[in-house]
Image (cartoon, grey):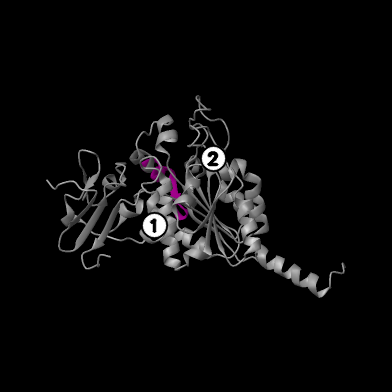
């Protein structure tokens, strides 16, 4: 189990998912409507991308997040 | 990781004040993504809002912003547009703000075809004040002032705007956030009065009273009650009952109010102030 921080980045070879835990309100929209069931809730109901390898970078979680708390990107994108 | 959203918001104001799962945040995201695609300069955009949960949007975006009185966002926006026609004015309203308190302003802004973009976040209830029914609460649904079900007929905002003469009319939902964003983009780019109604969720005030306690339930419900234009046309009258059609309804070119006003200024100057 990863240690919880305010801003968490999960990544594999091609996908990078960032969760801004401070802004997340545990509404569960990203988890429920993920077409590939990538996300699972933690004990606070905030998303953890357990099945990150299944992610197809459709970005629906990001589009539907009311709190701008989740971001999906490719690993090739540079951090600013 | 920096996102497009981060470039357009006042980060110090976050996390936002809205309830968990509130559609206002999804609409805010859709608006920002649309503006980013248009590559507009932040300093040229004015966001105007009235009163209500949705009107908090102007506090979160890093444009020129104005939070005005209940229902009067459109008159204030009209003033801005008349004084500085080059500014891009976006008006964000809730369903009560737009159709009840500001109903008259809405139809007359559409009639005059003022070059504004009105984005109406329709959560079908007065969420901030505790769940009173609004002119857009569906018949038979419950509110704190309709404990036995709402008997009123609802407005169809899209048809209302069309009849009043708006240049662009569309409807999206928070469930189809990507479609909503592209509809908003087209509306922003349109000269003349453009209206985008976004069907949104209010899990706390609306959902609680209508057996949809979680934001997820509400989004699923929104998905169920909305159909695309193509599907809608194939439905029978009975099947259309209780459903809302989404998509683009009007996209016409009409001379906007600023142009007409410029014309009348020119005419008056040519006549040297002499009437007739």
Would you say residue B229 sits in the magenta stretch? yes
Q: Quadrant of residue B99?
A: top right
Residue B18's place in the image compared with B182, above or below, is above
Which residue reaches farthest bottom?
A: B270
Whole-percent x, y for residue B197 in the image: 51, 50
Q: Which residues are magenta?
A: B220-232
Whole-percent x, y for residue B272 in the image: 84, 73
Dot 2 falls on which chain? B
Q: Is residue A28 visible?
A: yes
Q: Between residue B31 and residue B163, name the one nearer to us.
A: B31
Which SS does the magenta portion mostly show?
Answer: helix
Q: Between residue A48 and residue A3, name the one nearer to us.
A: A3
- Dot 1 corresponds to which residue? B178
The quadrant in which the N terminus of chain B is found is: bottom left
Mark 1 vs mark 2: same chain?
yes
Instruction: Say which mark, if any, is on residue B70.
Output: none
């Amino acid at each position: 189990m990863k240690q919880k921080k305010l801003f968490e980045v999960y990544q594999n070879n091609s996908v990078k998912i960032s969760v801004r835990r401070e802004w997340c309100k545990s509404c569960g929209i990203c988890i429920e409507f993920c077409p590939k069931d990538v996300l699972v809730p933690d004990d606070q109901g905030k998303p953890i991308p357990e099945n990150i390898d299944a992610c197809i970078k459709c970005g629906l979680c990001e589009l539907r997040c009311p709190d701008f708390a989740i971001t999906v990107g490719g690993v090739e994108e540079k951090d600013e | 990781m920096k996102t497009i959203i981060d470039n357009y918001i006042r980060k110090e104001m976050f996390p936002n004040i809205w309830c968990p799962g509130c559609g206002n945040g999804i609409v805010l995201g859709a608006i920002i993504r649309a503006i980013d695609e248009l590559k507009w300069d932040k300093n040229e955009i004015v966001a105007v809002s009235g009163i209500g949960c949705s009107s908090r949007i102007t506090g979160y975006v890093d444009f020129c912003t104005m939070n005005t009185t209940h229902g009067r966002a459109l008159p204030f926006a009209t003033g801005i547009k008349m004084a500085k026609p080059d500014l891009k004015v976006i008006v964000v309203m809730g369903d009560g703000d737009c159709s009840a308190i500001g109903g008259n302003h809405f139809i007359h802004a559409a009639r005059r075809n003022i070059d504004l973009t009105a984005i109406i976040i329709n959560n079908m209830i007065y969420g901030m004040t505790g769940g009173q029914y609004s002119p857009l609460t569906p018949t038979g649904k419950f509110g704190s002032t309709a404990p036995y079900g709402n008997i009123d007929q609802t407005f169809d905002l899209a048809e209302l705007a069309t009849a009043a003469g708006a240049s662009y009319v569309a409807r999206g939902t928070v469930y189809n956030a990507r479609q909503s964003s592209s509809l908003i983009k087209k509306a922003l780019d349109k000269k003349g009065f453009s209206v985008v109604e976004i069907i949104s969720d209010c899990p706390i005030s609306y959902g609680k009273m209508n057996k949809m306690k979680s934001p997820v339930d509400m989004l699923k419900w929104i998905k169920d009650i909305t159909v695309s234009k193509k599907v809608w046309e194939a439905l029978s009258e009975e099947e259309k009952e209780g459903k809302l059609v989404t998509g683009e309804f009007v996209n016409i070119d009409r001379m906007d109010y600023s142009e007409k006003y410029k014309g009348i200024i020119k005419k008056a100057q040519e006549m040297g102030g002499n009437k007739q």
